Image (tube, rainbow, N blue to C red):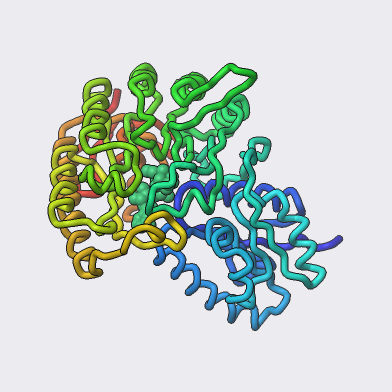
């Protein structure tokens, strides 16, 4: 019998990429591949890449030079690049990195078995066609993350918002949503397999819209259906675009205990002038009104954000507005980045990347320091409260402790006692750092 080939997939970037790697894994497993325990034993290495900032691409390039030496030792090793870098650079990547055999963009994964045959016949293979309707709805992803408790469900793909700084509309193509029935079925299957938390994923998850012969399912409608599958299945979603954060969505979140009370709402900048240059389609005031709506309808909801510092033309005054927005919103958590110019985006074509590197760095330091204070304050305010925590696994620091998350998406560590991953545990918070809550189990 022919021995099955071993594949190793390394994933970079956002949760969408991790979810896509599970789809790729599923396609390959159906085509006679098995997972390799590590890179060194693999016959096929796939890197699912990210282009969002220059340093994301540089990391992949560095890794590729390491793979070069593996290929020298084992010339039959096949190396493929998937995802956003594949889409952005296309055959240029094949010219620049001679040891790559295969390039596949985010909408081309179904063609992988064919492309691999082509590679086996000694040719290089490439598919970077973008699609208007590919959602991989019928593919049952293999769950690579391994916890067996939490899983991603990708519900929409692509983006057409064209924020001035962003490469995503060019690498992931047009916005399209997935059939709601296939999403609900996936949620039901995951519960039956023992999963207890799903995260609905999309570049702008709350822009989800399915049209079936004139009958529309929007994101609040979909969330209602998914949350209704089982009261013990927690539901999260990411990332929300502020423009589509409707009161209706907040009300559905309020209606279901199992819809987690955590919203990731990227602000990018606190200055309306910057937001307009960024083409974000909302102003500072409009965003603040949406935060007020969250506070009004979901008083115990956490809010996290993304911030870009040093975008084209950003002044000290604009920067101060970002800091004041952060203080006002009291974000529980934030992902903070220096602006990185991406080729062919609107900003690269129209504006000058004119904030000096050292100014970008010092503004980023200030933003990170402020967020550290805000996260610590938010966690300190939780001391004494009792949260229902879904246990996900054993704590890295101690085998006698479990870790999990509360509804607000904060990591909570507590003594194991008789609990195991997958259990819902009531934990009273006793202490904290800026990143973690620690507590003791309360018997109910
Ligand atoms: N679709 C989501 C939204 O609009 O809020 C965000 C998706 S993007 C993959 C994740 C984050 O990367 C963005 O929210 C933004 O903060 C950051 N980002 C995108 N392009 C960037 C760039 N050129 N430089 C620095 N950060 C960038
Ligand atoms: Fe990029 Fe803007 Fe689309 Fe988000 S909404 S993926 S930041 S273009």
Q: Is residue 334 above or below residue 177?
A: below
* Quadrant, the C terminus: top left
Residue in the picture at 16% in, 45% down: 374
Q: Nearer the viewer, residue 146 or 258?
A: 258
Residue 425 in the image, given as x and y percentages of width and height = 34, 31
Residue 63: x %, y % from top left: 50, 72
Rendered-image quadrant of the N terminus? bottom right
Residue 115 is left or right of residue 239, and the answer is: right
* In the depicted structure, whether residue 29 falls above or below residue 139: below
Q: Nearer the viewer, residue 443 or 272?
A: 272
Near-viewer residue (271 or 76): 271
Q: Is residue 208 left or right of residue 36?
A: left
Q: Report the residue at 53% width, 77% height from top.
A: 66
- Specify the quadrant of the image occupied by residue 411: top left
Residue beneath the point at 54% across and 46% down:
19
Q: Position of residue 96 (x, y in %)?
A: 58, 76
Counting labels gives 0
Q: Is residue 232 visible?
A: no
Extreme-right residue of the structure? 1
Q: Position of residue 2 (x, y in %)?
A: 84, 62
Q: Is residue 246 above or below residue 352?
A: above
Q: Residue at x 61, y 78 (%)?
A: 70
Viewer can see residue 178: yes
């Amino acid at each position: 019998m022919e021995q099955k080939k071993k594949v190793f997939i390394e994933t970079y970037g956002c949760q969408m990429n991790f979810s896509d790697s599970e789809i790729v894994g599923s396609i390959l497993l159906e085509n006679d591949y098995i997972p390799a325990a590590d890179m060194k034993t693999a016959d096929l290495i796939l890197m699912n890449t990210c282009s969002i900032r220059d340093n994301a691409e540089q990391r992949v390039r560095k890794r590729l030079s390491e793979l070069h030496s593996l290929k020298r030792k084992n010339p039959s090793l096949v190396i493929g690049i998937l995802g956003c870098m594949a889409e952005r650079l296309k055959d240029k990547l094949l010219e620049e990195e001679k040891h790559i055999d295969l390039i596949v963009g985010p909408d081309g994964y179904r063609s992988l078995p064919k492309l691999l045959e082509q590679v086996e016949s000694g040719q290089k293979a490439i598919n970077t066609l973008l699609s208007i309707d590919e959602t991989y709805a019928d593919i049952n992803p293999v769950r690579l993350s391994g916890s067996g408790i939490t899983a991603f469900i990708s519900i929409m793909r692509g983006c057409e918002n064209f924020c001035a700084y962003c490469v995503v509309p060019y690498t992931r193509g047009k916005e399209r949503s997935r059939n709601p029935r296939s999403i609900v079925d996936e949620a039901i299957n995951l519960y039956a397999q023992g999963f207890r938390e799903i995260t609905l994923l999309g570049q702008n998850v709350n822009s989800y819209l399915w049209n079936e012969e004139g009958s529309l399912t929007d994101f609040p409608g979909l969330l209602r259906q998914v949350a209704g599958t089982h009261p013990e299945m927690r539901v999260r979603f990411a990332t929300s675009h502020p423009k589509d954060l409707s009161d209706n969505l907040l009300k559905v979140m309020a209606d279901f205990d199992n819809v987690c009370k955590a919203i990731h709402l990227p602000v990018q900048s606190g200055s309306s002038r910057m937001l307009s240059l960024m083409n974000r389609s909302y102003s500072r005031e409009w965003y603040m009104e949406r935060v007020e709506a969250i506070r009004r309808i979901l008083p115990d909801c956490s809010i996290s954000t993304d911030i870009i510092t040093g975008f084209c033309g950003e002044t000290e005054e604009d920067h101060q507005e970002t800091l004041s927005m952060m203080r006002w919103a009291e974000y529980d958590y934030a992902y903070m980045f220096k602006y990185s110019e991406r080729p062919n985006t609107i900003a690269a074509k129209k504006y000058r990347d004119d904030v000096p590197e050292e100014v970008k760095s010092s503004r980023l330091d200030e933003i990170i320091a402020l967020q550290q204070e805000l996260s610590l304050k938010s966690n300190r305010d939780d001391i004494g409260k009792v949260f229902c925590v879904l246990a996900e696994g054993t704590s890295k620091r101690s085998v006698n402790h479990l870790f999990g998350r509360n509804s607000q998406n904060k990591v909570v560590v507590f003594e194991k006692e008789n609990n195991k991953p997958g259990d819902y545990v009531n934990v009273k918070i006793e202490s904290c750092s800026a990143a973690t809550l620690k507590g003791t189990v309360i018997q109910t």
